[in-house]
Image (tube, helix red, strand yellow):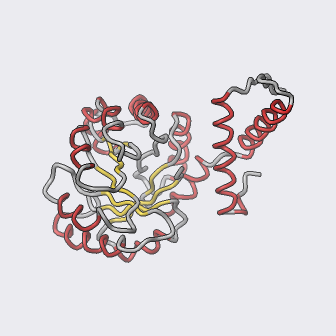
Amino acid sequence: MLLSLLYVPGDRPDRFGKAIDSGADAVILDLEDAVVAARKSYARDAVAEFVARTHRVPVFVRVNELTGPDVAADLDVVAAAPGLAGLRLPKVESPETVRALAERVSAPLHPLVESALGVERAYDIASAHPAVASIGLGEADLRSDLGVTTEEGLGWVRGRIVVAARAAGLPPPTMPVYANVADLAGLADSCALGRRLGFVGRTAIHPRQLPVIVAAFRPSAEEVSRARELLDAVAEAQTRDSGTVVLPDGRFADRAMVAAARRTVDLATRYAAADPDRSSD
């Protein structure tokens, strides 16, 4: 799972290397909204040069709209690049569009739902093709389409995206960007809300947002302790050939809880290895 992903405008190659070193779990080079029409060609060439080689964190590329005039040129130069981890697809509203693209490229696809119609078709988009590796939200356009102005007003939409992803057998989604880069307290509150809904991470538009995102989605020391307690109890029960495990606090440990506990421990271990000073142990 990727807890933090950092967007970088495709026409700012001076920031590409810094993004790799930023501490983000992955980098997204943006050819769409972050680049004005006059600089699309320049951005495309810069991104193509960067993903022509591999990097130590995954590098995704957000291409232009699939129904627009620029996407064909985007795909021509980045879709088969060795350093490309996947394609972020903006403003997807149709599973047929995703399937058509999947027949043209071999890269993993990550559709973004950004309209009411896309929300209605979220499961169909998520399950459109085996090449679909995740599904997510683009909330700026969606807020405008729905007339929603608050975080709370998007809760039901976010929940639908989480359900659509899991129903299609995809990983839990990551949250979209939080536009106010100065409001780190608001970002933390928003991440906490998203985590309660089932999101597992978030995209950022500035490196200063990354520590807040990781802190919000990384398992706490208490969560890790409870997960390890559950796994130890299950292991002990197996030595007694017992299929029933009841923890001291009254929790029954079924298979779903065991799977969740293992994910918690694995994620905590991974981040502790990357950042020993912030270990959850």
- The residue that appears at 23% across and 54% down in the rendered structure is 104
User: In this rendering, is residue 62 above or below 217?
Assistant: below
User: In this rendering, is residue 274 above or below 50?
Assistant: above
- The residue that appears at 53% across and 58% down in the rendered structure is 210
Rendered image quadrant of residue 117 = top left
What x and y, as percent, mark residue 111? 33, 46
User: In this rendering, is residue 206 above or below 248?
Assistant: below
Depth order, front residue of 100/205: 100
- The residue that appears at 48% across and 69% down in the rendered structure is 20
Work out whether residue 49 can be spotted.
yes
* Left or right: 49 in relation to 270: left
Work out whether residue 153 can be spotted.
no
* Left or right: 213 in relation to 254: left
Depth order, front residue of 193/147: 193
- The residue that appears at 42% across and 53% down in the rendered structure is 180
For this orientation, the residue located farthest to the right is 240
Depth order, front residue of 113/204: 113
Q: Disc count in the image?
A: 0
What x and y, as percent, mark residue 280? 73, 51
Depth order, front residue of 265/104: 104
For this orientation, the residue located farthest to the front is 241
What x and y, as percent, mark residue 60? 38, 60
* Left or right: 58 in relation to 30: right
User: In this rendering, is residue 56 above or below 130?
Assistant: below
What x and y, as percent, mark residue 220? 69, 45
